[in-house]
Image (cartoon, coloured by chain):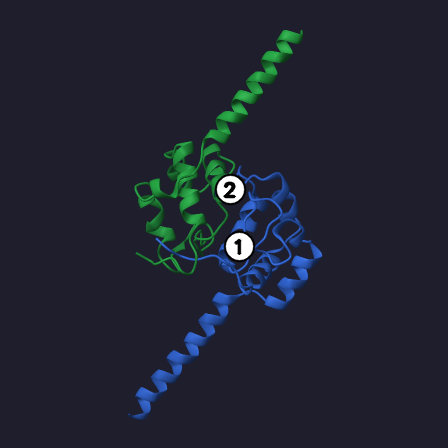
Chain colours: A green, B blue
Amino acid sequence: MKKLLAVLVLAGLGSAAGAADIVGNPKAAPNKIEQCIGCHGIPEYKTAFPEVYQVPMIGGQSARYIEAALHAYKKGDRQHPQMTPTAKALSDQDIADIAAYYAQQTVATPNK
Amino acid sequence: MNGDAMKHILLALVCGAVSLSATAGGDINRGAAVAKKYNCASCHGVDYKTPIDPTYPKLAGQHADYLAHSLAAYKRGNKSINGRNNPIMAGMAQPLSDQDMADIGAYLQSLPGPLVVRK
């Protein structure tokens, strides 16, 4: 029983460490954001289903929230005709990199 | 400028003003009261840009129509197309009317925040 517990605890530690190993690198993001900028990089860009609304500003948003949102689309907790397939194509590392990239943006960030 | 041209310009200006106010939709003051009633700040921060948990979004300055849409999506749940499943926000969004959502959105958009549109 003790051995089983120890295995379970170690397995838990292992998976926690696995998740913590993924560190977002904003410098790795430029090759991964082509899909993002087509909507989120255009001021006042609107999507139309089922309500018509401007897509959210994600520059300056917290990285952990962007990660949570993308994982929710990937998992199916959020459903959206564009965001669901976009998020499903991203690895956990991609998500961390993209989140880190947008989180560091401020009003001083040049719009390249 | 002749009279007809002047009338056209006036008409265009009036139509522009009407469509602008229709786009704005929400009532900032009422939105502030609704946000207070449901205590949105208890998680999203008193200034709505310092949430108590980093996995919660900063809302200050975000587009009003997006915020109203996201509340509607939480109310719909993810069984519906373009819906969201979130145990906390589902509960928060249930009692809100469409007008409540538009007003909350207008209020939050009116607040100064760090969000930007950049490539």
Identify the residue under disc 1: B67
Q: Where's the C terminus of chain A, which quadrant?
A: bottom left
Could you tell me which secondary element the residue under label 1 belongs to?
helix
In the rendered image, the vertical position of residue B110 relative to residue B101, given as above or below: below
Residue B87, placed above or below residue B4: above
Question: How far across and down, in percent of the image, does residue A61 sit?
Answer: 48, 50
Residue A81 visible to an observer of this rendering: no
The x and y percentages for residue B44 are 61, 51
Report the residue at 48% width, 34% height from top.
Answer: A76
Q: Disc number at residue A64?
A: 2
**The residue marked by circle 1 belongs to what chain?**
B
The type of residue carrying mark 2 is Arg
Could you tell whether A94 is left or right of A75 in the image?
Answer: left
Please tell me which residue is depicted at 42% across the width and 48% down the height of the picture: A102
Q: CA distance from mark 1 to mark 2?
A: 19 Å
**Where does the image place residue B81, in percent across and percent down from the top left?**
48, 41
Disc 1 packing (10 Å; few <14; some 14–19; many ≥20): many
* Side of A30 relative to B65 (left or right): left
Which chain does the numbered disc 2 sit on? A
Q: Nearer the viewer, residue A108 or A71?
A: A108
